[in-house]
């Protein structure tokens, strides 16, 4: 008789040191939604995608949504049986040889930190716009970086439940502002389809292919609810739902925003690809110009919430890595009172702040910080997603739950990530983006070398 399968990770939260059963399903969903930062894409990412895909921006987001939904379905299969603080890193560690979990852990850690740094750049952008419109004076970009990263680090250090609740309300408010503007814009222009976009006028296949890769950055972090497995209530049910729901919500929202922003900016006779605050322009076009400053404020606090979500997720990945010997053992401990990975949070906060403050101090534009760090993060996410999807059949086969449908899902998700990776490498992007793959490769090699060194040292000591 075949032995019944028992979820192996139900006991994991006991030894994690984190506060178990602290987060409601809505608060768990808020972690993924906040890491996605849905307001950041309409304000900063969609214009970048439009610069590549033009009237095919909606199509780029449709294809990116399909790829991310494949990943959401794949990761939700893991989350049905495993609840822990290590997210994709633990999934791969329980399925493939240690070198693959090592690569996944370091890739995911970089991905969350780089995403946090990227959206901190977005915070600088909209913080500068908001302060200038409010006071008429410029504010130090380095100071804004410190406010954003320092504030999020403090909150993540203190209480995960406070973090989740704050992220939930921040994102709900900022998305509401965007939806109001887009709904009014749609109502004012009439409920009819835009033939220019539907016929993909002026769109090239190479432009859409490159745009899809950039559009994927809008979704990265949708899986971050999986880092809360030790803290969510009923995690084996709550987390799979949060992963799928966040991917579905983000996909629908981004496709709608891409379509309506392209339509609205064309009606305003402005180039969406050159706009630094498209929703402010659209608010005026929709007849509600007073929402412009509120949208800027909503975008700014959304960037703050995303930085907080990235800090929360990265710290838990680092906690798990330290407990498995991939980082210093002190980072695998939790705060006695707050039940948070406090030392890991401080390290993550430091490495999030350094590139942002350093680039800002050198006068690099906040939009460039957003683009550079976001592009670097994509390499980490694609690596982690690809290895996780490839490891799913091995995990389920070992536990007697592998089916033909799941195998096909794994193959499709892995292929999607390989295609996305190819899209980041060819054609060769302009400088400094062309250097990012080499920087990422050096980082991963260093992580693997550290694993080899610590493993040999442990064997020699033993």
Image (spheres, rainbow, N blue to C red):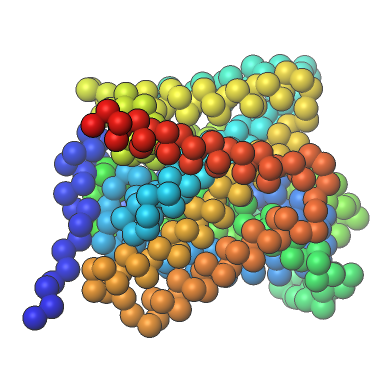
Is residue 43 visible to us here? no
- Tell me residue 311's x, y (percent): 46, 34
* In front of the other: 1 or 265: 1
* In the image, farthest residue toward the front: 460
- Tell me residue 109's x, y (percent): 48, 40
State which quarter of the image contains the C terminus: top left
Q: Quadrant of residue 211?
A: bottom right
Residue at 27% over, 24% down? 335
Is residue 54 visible to us here? yes
Residue at 22% over, 22% down? 336
- Tell me residue 23's x, y (percent): 29, 44
Left or right? Give the position of 153 relative to 364: left
- Tell me residue 455's x, y (percent): 35, 37
Residue at 37% over, 49% down? 98
55 lies above or below 307: below
Q: Quadrant of residue 327?
A: top left
142 lies above or below 36: above
Residue at 82% over, 41% down? 431
* In front of the other: 361 or 92: 92
State which quarter of the image contains the N terminus: bottom left
């Amino acid at each position: 008789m075949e032995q019944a399968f028992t979820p192996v990770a139900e006991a994991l939260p006991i030894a994690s040191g984190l506060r178990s059963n602290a987060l409601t399903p809505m608060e768990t969903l808020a972690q993924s939604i906040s890491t996605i930062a849905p307001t950041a894409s309409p304000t900063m990412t969609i214009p970048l995608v439009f610069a590549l895909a033009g009237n095919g921006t909606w199509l780029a987001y449709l294809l990116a949504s399909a790829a991310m939904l494949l990943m959401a379905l794949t990761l939700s299969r893991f989350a049905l049986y495993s609840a822990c603080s290590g997210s994709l890193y633990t999934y791969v560690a329980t399925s493939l040889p240690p070198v693959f979990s090592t690569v996944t852990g370091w890739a995911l850690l970089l991905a969350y930190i780089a995403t946090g740094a990227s959206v901190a750049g977005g915070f600088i952008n909209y913080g500068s716009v908001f302060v200038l419109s409010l006071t008429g004076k410029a504010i130090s970009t380095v100071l804004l970086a410190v406010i954003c990263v320092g504030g999020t680090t403090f909150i993540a250090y203190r209480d995960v439940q406070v973090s989740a609740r704050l992220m939930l309300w921040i994102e709900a408010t900022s998305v509401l502002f965007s939806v109001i503007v887009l709904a009014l814009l749609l109502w004012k222009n009439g409920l009819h389809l835009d033939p220019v976009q539907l016929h993909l006028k002026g769109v090239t296949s190479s432009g859409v292919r490159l745009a899809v890769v950039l559009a994927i950055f809008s979704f990265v972090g949708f899986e971050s609810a999986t880092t809360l497995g030790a803290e969510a209530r009923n995690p084996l049910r709550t987390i799979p739902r949060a992963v799928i729901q966040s991917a579905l919500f983000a996909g629908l929202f981004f496709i709608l925003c891409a379509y309506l922003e392209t339509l609205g900016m064309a009606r305003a006779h402005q180039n969406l690809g050159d706009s630094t605050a498209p929703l402010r322009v659209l608010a005026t076009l929709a007849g509600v110009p007073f929402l412009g400053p509120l949208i800027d404020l909503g975008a700014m606090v959304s960037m703050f919430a995303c930085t907080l979500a990235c800090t929360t997720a990265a710290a838990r990945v680092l906690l798990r890595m330290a407990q498995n010997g991939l980082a210093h053992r002190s980072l695998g401990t939790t705060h006695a009172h707050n039940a948070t990975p406090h030392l890991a949070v401080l390290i993550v906060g430091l490495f999030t702040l350094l590139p942002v403050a350093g680039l800002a101090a050198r006068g690099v534009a906040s939009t460039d910080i957003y683009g550079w760090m976001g592009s670097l993060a994509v390499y980490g996410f694609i690596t982690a997603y690809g290895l996780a999807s490839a490891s799913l059949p091995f995990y389920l086969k070992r536990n007697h739950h592998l089916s033909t449908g799941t195998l096909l899902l794994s193959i499709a998700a892995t292929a999607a990530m390989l295609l996305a990776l190819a899209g980041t490498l060819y054609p060769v992007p302009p400088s400094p983006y062309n250097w990012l793959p080499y920087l990422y490769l050096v980082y991963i090699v260093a992580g693997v070398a550290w694993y080899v060194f610590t493993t040999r040292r442990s064997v020699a000591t033993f």
